[in-house]
Image: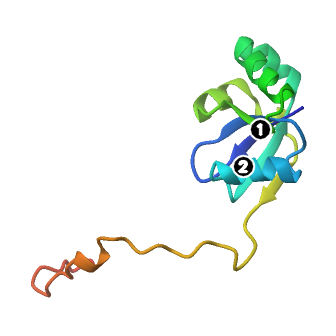
Amino acid sequence: MKAYVIFSSSEPVLVLARRTIRSEAVLNELRRIGCQKFIAREVPVEQLRNLYGRQFDVIEESIQKGCDLRVLDFSGRRIFRYLPFSDFGPAYRRELQTGAAEPRRRSPHASTRQQPSPLTQSPFG
């Protein structure tokens, strides 16, 4: 079992994974929860076991039963309080391949928006 701090578009999350972050099963789970572009740093599992106690045990049990990835903590403030940067392993970066990004969706309200008239426009744009 591996543990990683995942830095994505929102707050960092702490996850436990059955395999390494490079495995297709773990990457698929990260994709499923919306982490398509991220930086991951491995952290010591035993230290997390001591810090999180019963919560760690429950998540470890679900991984042993077949889950590929589970979130242990989603509070960036708590993660940074518990884990010193010196415990972070080397960074693993992952992002979508060029051209693989989803097309930008147009807002359903875009056609109803009115452009400001020249009289109401601010001199600042």
Check the image and name the residue furthest to the bottom.
118
Quarter the C terminus occupies: bottom left
Q: Label 2 neighbourhood size at 10 Å, few (<14), some (14-19), many (20+)?
A: many
- Residue depicted at 59% across the width and 32% down the height: 75
Secondary structure beneath disc 2? Answer: helix
Question: Which x, y percent locates residue 3?
Answer: 82, 34
| Residues tagged 1 and 2 counted as in contact (Cβ below 8 A) | yes
- Mark positioned earlier in the residue sequence (1 or 2): 2
Quarter the N terminus occupies: top right
Please give the label number shown on residue 69. 1
Question: Which x, y percent locates residue 98?
Answer: 73, 77
Check the image and name the residue furthest to the left.
119
In this view, 81 is above or below 27? above
Q: CA distance from mark 1 to mark 2?
A: 8 Å
Q: Where, by quadrant of the figure, is residue 107 drawn?
A: bottom left
Secondary structure beneath disc 1? Answer: strand
Amino acid type, residue under disc 2 in the picture = Leu
Q: Where, by quadrant of the figure, is residue 44 drawn?
A: top right
Q: Where, by quadrant of the figure, is residue 122 drawn?
A: bottom left
Question: Which x, y percent locates residue 59?
Answer: 75, 24
Amino acid type, residue under disc 1 in the picture = Leu
- Residue depicted at 12% across the width and 79% down the height: 120
Residue marked by disc 2: 30
Question: Which x, y percent locates residue 33?
Answer: 64, 48
Please give the label number shown on residue 85. none
Q: Is residue 84 left or right of residue 103?
A: right
- Residue depicted at 72% across the width and 12% down the height: 54
Q: Label 1 neighbourhood size at 10 Å, few (<14), some (14-19), many (20+)?
A: many
